[in-house]
Amino acid sequence: MEATINNAARLNSDKRVTCAQRILVIFRNDDPSALSNLAHEREIFGIFERFGAPQTLAVIPKIALTDLHDPAGCGERSLLDNTEMLAFLKDYVLRSGSEVALHGCTHRTNRHSIPSRREYFEFRRLSLTEQEGMIREGTQILERAFGFRPITFVPPWNRMDHNTVEACARQGYKIVSAGPFMATKPGLLSLGVNTDLHRFRDDYQAAKKGRSRVILNILLHSSTLTEKQKGLLIQALELVSNDDECKAVTIARAAEIAPETAGLVNDAARSFAPLHEVVGSSRAKAWPYVAALRRIFGRDLVGPSEREAEEFYRRGEYLLCAERNRLADRASYLIVFSGRVAAMLLGVLLAFCSTRFLRPQTFSDALSMAGAVIGLCALGFLASRAATAIDTRREIIAGGCFCALGFLACAVGVYSLGPAH
């Protein structure tokens, strides 16, 4: 065992990555905590040491003691309270060249989660003050535990929002790692997971077909790794270690040696990211209309282009994905414009149909019409509550307002005509 550790330390002491090593492979291991099974973690971490591959360890600073999916749970255990686990992690990080990242604060869902839709999140939809306080507390625990501040933040369930981004920037983080795409801000790089143990072989083979530099970020959870997944992990490590084009690195190391590629890989993932996740864009605003068309026609009208973009992404053709992004942004703008016009015409149609039976000639009739307008606006607001993305909520409200505007314009026009003859 000692010889294995020394060999791993020697391999990881060589920080050079040659130009020939164009495929960078990251193993992001989520959820090490004070409740981890030490014997199980030793076994899994030992596999990485045999191949001299570092990990990015997304460590939970003080894990919730009750069900992580229950926002009403209580009680946490800090990593500082489990001295055996902490000593193991510190020693492993030192000899393997692995990275420690902050993985939330307690990993418990917050009050805004939607369990019925399996939408769990610890940070999303909380205020900036709340999120910054949680990140500050978690950072202080890891700094006391390991003697240094992490620079990579990993949100539980890979879910965060614009307030999380701002909170990370304020707390000095340089990298966030969630899903394949995350809208950030200057000075904060996004390098999220884009594969897992089950599909890594396929993504690896796709990357081999290309010529550009590729970053594959594998998500795994060593604490719940099954025997089948353990076999897949060994296969992945064998592929990486036996291929001169590949190099296993941490998230921070990938950002250091290939910052331009790291930026490209995040932007390229925008080409097939769910529309509502592309914060602050016409694509996020287009989501309500795209979803409505999907319900009407029973199929995804934008699916084929997204699948094609994802194929480019898997091959590392990030610049082709950028071109797809431009086309998608243009199409989304047209969808939003058309959707708002359609909402206004729907309001006109509703007003026309209602005035066939009621001409607003009296004050009470006018109040009825005003009530209908207010009702349409309220309906848009209530419908927006089902959405979790801020742009989607705003666009649903905007659609309701355009519908109300069309209704009001038609009603006023009919009223100006006076009684029917």
Image: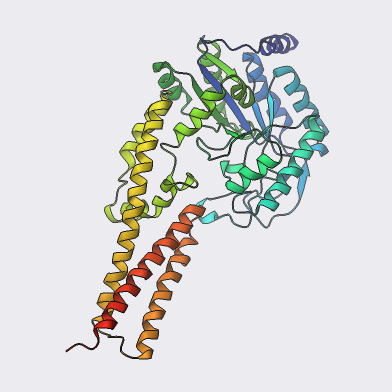
The residue under the point 47% across, 61% down is 384
- Rendered position, 210 above or below 61: above
Q: Position of residue 416 (x, y in %)?
A: 27, 82
Q: Nearer the viewer, residue 148 or 62?
A: 148
Residue 195 seen in the current view? no
The residue under the point 53% across, 15% down is 240
User: Residue 230 appears in which quarter of the rendering?
Assistant: top right
- The quadrant the C terminus occupies is bottom left
Residue 285 seen in the current view? yes
Q: How is the image coloured?
A: rainbow
- Rendered position, 137 above or below 195: below
- The quadrant the N terminus occupies is top right
- Rendered position, 289 above or below 55: below
Residue ranking furthest to the front: 416
Q: Is 358 situated left or right of 72 in this image? A: left
- Rendered position, 138 above or below 115: above
Q: How many marks?
A: 0
Q: Is 136 situated left or right of 339 in this image? A: right
Q: Nearer the viewer, residue 91 or 150?
A: 150
Q: Position of residue 242 (x, y in %)?
A: 53, 10
Q: Position of residue 368 (x, y in %)?
A: 38, 84
The residue under the point 75% across, 20% down is 94
Q: Position of residue 238 (x, y in %)?
A: 54, 15
Residue ranking furthest to the left: 421
User: Residue 159 appears in which quarter of the rendering?
Assistant: top right
